[in-house]
Amino acid sequence: MQNHWNEGDASRCATDLALRVYSSRLIGRDTSMVLHGGGNTSVKTEEPDRFGETRRVLWVKGSGWDLETIEEAGFCPLLLDHLIRLAQLPALSDPAMVEELATHQTRAAAPAASVEAILHALLPYKFVDHSHADAVVSVTNTADGEARIREIYGEDVVVIPYVMPGFDLARAVASRFPLEATPRTQGMVLMNHGIFSFGATARESYERMIALVARAERYLQQHAGEIKPPAAPADIELPRLALAELRRDVSREAGNPMLLAANRTAQALAFVRHPDLSRIARYGPATPDHVLRTKRLPLIGRDVAAYAEAYRHYFEEMSKRAREAKTMLDPAPRVILDPELGLCAAGRSARDCAIVRDLYEHTIDIILAGESLGGYRALPAQDIFDVEYWDLEQAKLKKSGKPAPFAGEVALVTGAASGIGKACVDALLARGAAVVGLDIDPAIERLYERQDFLGLRCNVADGAEVDAALDRMLEAYGGLDMLILNAGVFPGGRRIEELADAEWRKVMAVNLDANLALLRECQPLLRLAPRYGRVVFIGSKNVPAPGPGAAAYSASKAALTQLMRVAALEWGGEGIRVNALHPDAVFDTGLWTGEVLAARAAHYGLSVEDYKRKNVLKTEVTSRDVAELAAEMCGPLFAKTTAAQVPVDGGNDRVI
């Protein structure tokens, strides 16, 4: 555990809130303390109201913000005295508490406050930090966790037995903390949850957090030794179809398409092949925060239907004990542990998958550490159920908006670094898909830095490179739903009597042979797509209306179109629909430089602008126009259309 405080950086913070942002980011940068929105921080200040009277304000981290990147706008200012009065109430439902927080903000545009705001208000310190440090949770999640925590910290921390986050936890702290705190107190440990530190300054609170977590780390080193899983056996080839089948099954139980990210690192493979996996992985998540992302338990193996049935039974039993009817969340697993596939994380988006994966990677460390201390122990089943079906989380689900049309789906686009291919990437991302872009141009790898895009340098005419790219796609997202075949070459004009065999073969290899190979390799994946596979060929106006000097290109695109028609016939019975677009005169691509445009316009005696609109509708056709229609052809409007050939050319009199 390293102390990253820099007094030079801190001295540039002019206000307490600015210091709060600075020290919060220091905590957030360490994934062993907080992950993906976990943890929270606060600072207490005074400020004048509209009447010039001083009021006490608690600035607490707002919902939806991560400590690693938080800004001043990410903190919610609340009337401190009102929060302290709320804590004196004998009872308050969590929805009512959230209502009180929302109506006692001093900034209407501020984000919703953390549900632990009242707890922060009660602690009599200016700065308060809260993390879910792995080392601390590893100790608390053992059979004798409380005794070990007291051994580590003595009177330096107040220990609070587990209470579900929300008003009940605030009340528990209100009743115990004043009685147990001493002048030596630097922090507070919430069993099975995390650790708090506090101080008069941002630096004091931050450095106490670092020091307290470091003490837990040293304890683990002394009592648990080197914590690592047994060595992983030699890796095996990724079973693509098994991964795609698993994704289909998870999607079926979830009721909508899901992504599936496979982690096959040495650490993950060693854990999923642990000889005692069936026991150590079934205790439950490390903290209440993990429950909301990873669900109660992981699936061991691939029997999703059996997992879902067990989940339904668990729900029925817990509901009886809870004595109230609740709407059951979907019974699909979010974490799957399989000796061949590795650690698989399921989610509606690439970001959801990343969160689940990261959380469970840390859970692995916590489980192994707990085992080395005599046995890992998670929360009892009823406590886990109460968090999973927390009325605040149920309310969030009801408020969540309609998902993007391609949420949970995967698209593969060839020739994706520029022109029509890049526009297709943009159109699919905008509709919520996770997109894999292939291109021979290395720029594809830097096209976008986001979790839902994977850019791979790949020569689609090279079978080995395509094979490796498909493996990368499967590991990242778990399957394939949409295939946009766009990559192609357009050689310089050449009459037939001047056309060399080598040039003919090169054009056919890229424009036709490579697409045949991709179709062959992708068909088994498209067949397993939760909403059935979709393929869009980017053809050409040269199919219905070829021009002189383009024999190789025209013939390759005509053959490609015929391949599309055969694929539609052969795959229709499996629900895979296959269509083609025939664009023309799309000038915002790499093929059309300013010089080439000017030369072609002069050839026709037209200005460049008139040349661009040399069609029946007198309109310009852009890459985006083609891409938007390609994306729509993968959507519900074309759900009953296959083998169609649609021109995107503004109307060509030769075609018409």
Image: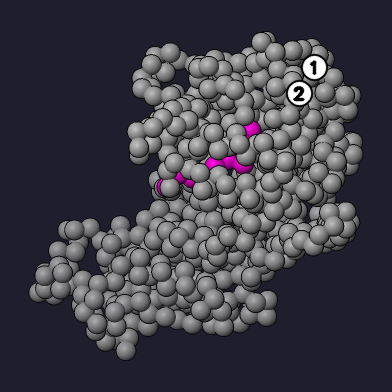
In x, y percent, where is residue 278? 89, 42
**Secondary structure category for the residue under label 2:** strand
- Label ID, residue 380: none
Q: Which residue is mark 2?
A: 159
**Label 1 CA crowd tier, 10 Å (few <14, some 14–19, many 20+):** some
The stretch in magenta equals: 109-119
- The residue furthest bottom is 656
- Mark 2 and mark 1 residues within 8 Å of each other at the beta carbon: yes
Amino acid type shown at disc 2: Val
From the viewer's perspective, is 94 left or right of 140?
left
Q: Nearer the viewer, residue 62 or 614?
A: 62
In x, y percent, where is residue 444? 43, 48
Q: Which residue is mark 1?
A: 150
Whether residue 268 is visible here, answered yes or no, is no
**Rounded to the nearest whole Å, what is the CA distance between mark 2 and mark 1?**
8 Å
Quadrant of the drawing holding the N terminus: top right
Amino acid type shown at disc 1: Arg
Q: Residue at x 31, y 60 (%)?
A: 589
Main structural element of the magenta stretch: helix, strand or loop? loop
